């Protein structure tokens, strides 16, 4: 019976140390979340679906369960403890560690609760729920997915329009190149055509010059006759 009791005692001590290590790590994270879990400056649409407030509340529940479990193990250790001063000192030490953890947990929880109450007062006691308050997490994820899908569809439409415009411009460019090639072929095939066009333009310029001289002489003669 003594051997069984000793084995149970050592097993409980091992469980207590593991719980204490786990609680210690989680308390550090709990304290950090308590210092940065404010979302009062964000609009309801800007608050992420999983924010520091949610993580803080989840971790708070986990820590409360671990502390309760550690307290129960300490009580069992006291019931199964072998007699002796060293054993009593060990039990006392585990209870002191548990008390320190409980105090740290309570202090962080109280600080966050006080901050939440202060933020609620600063918001003017507005009791109306945010637009997304009636939505479950699943509904909010669905809403975000629909927004993303709509954005993707809009982007795809703009890309298609840009590609169609690019294809149209490319087609026009190819048409102009074909026309230019055709004109060059005609010019190379009929070299006399350029010469004919040049003579026609030269004759037009000469006729314009003659008409201009005739008009100038007539105007001069009319002015001369008018002054005489």
Image (cartoon, rainbow, N blue to C red):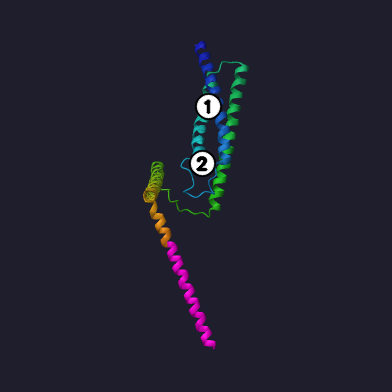
> Where is residue 30 shown, x and y percent of the image?
55, 35
Q: Kindly check if marks 2 and 1 are in contact, taking CB atoms under 8 A apart as contact.
A: no
- Mark 2 and mark 1 lie on one chain; the one further toward the N terminus is 2
Report the front residue among 121 and 91. 121
Toward which corner of the image does residue 99 lie, by quadrant? top right
- At 53% from the left edge and 30% from the top edge, which residue is drawn? 67
> Where is residue 227 shown, x and y percent of the image?
54, 87
Q: Is residue 94 magenta?
A: no
- At 57% from the left edge and 45% from the top edge, which residue is drawn? 115
> Where is residue 118 shown, x and y percent of the image?
56, 49
In the image, residue 181 sits, relative to residue 211, either above or below, namely above
Report the front residue among 161 and 23. 161
Residue numbers of the magenta segment: 201-228
Residue where numbered disc 2 is placed = 53
- Marks 2/1: CA distance? 26 Å
- At 53% from the left edge and 84% from the top edge, which residue is drawn? 224
Q: Main secondary structure of the magenta part?
A: helix
In the image, residue 62 sits, relative to residue 2, either above or below, namely below
Report the quarter where the C terminus lies. bottom right
Residue 157 visible in the current orientation: no
Residue where numbered disc 1 is placed = 70
- How dense is the environment of label 1, judged by Cα within 10 Å: few (below 14), some, or many (20 and up)? many
Toward which corner of the image does residue 23 lie, by quadrant? top right
């Amino acid at each position: 019976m003594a051997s069984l009791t000793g084995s149970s005692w050592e097993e409980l001590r091992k469980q207590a140390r593991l719980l204490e290590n786990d609680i210690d790590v989680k308390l550090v994270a709990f304290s950090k979340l308590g210092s940065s879990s404010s979302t009062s400056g964000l609009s309801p649409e800007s608050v992420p679906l999983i924010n520091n407030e949610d993580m803080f509340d989840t971790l708070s529940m986990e820590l409360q369960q671990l502390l309760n479990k550690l307290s129960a193990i300490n009580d069992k250790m006291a019931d199964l403890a072998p007699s002796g001063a060293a054993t009593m000192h060990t039990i006392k030490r585990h209870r002191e560690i548990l008390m320190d953890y409980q105090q740290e947990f309570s202090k962080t929880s109280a600080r966050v609760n006080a901050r939440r109450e202060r933020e609620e007062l600063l918001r003017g006691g507005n009791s109306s729920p945010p637009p997304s308050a009636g939505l479950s997490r699943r509904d909010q994820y669905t809403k975000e997915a629909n927004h993303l899908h709509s954005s993707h569809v809009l982007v795809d439409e703009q890309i298609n329009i840009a590609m169609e415009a690019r294809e149209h411009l490319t087609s026009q460019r190819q048409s102009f190149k074909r026309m230019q090639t055709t004109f060059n072929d005609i010019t190379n095939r009929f070299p006399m055509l350029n010469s004919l066009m040049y003579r026609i333009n030269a004759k037009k310029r000469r006729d314009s010059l003659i008409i201009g001289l005739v008009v100038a002489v007539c105007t001069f003669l009319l002015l001369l006759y008018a002054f005489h």
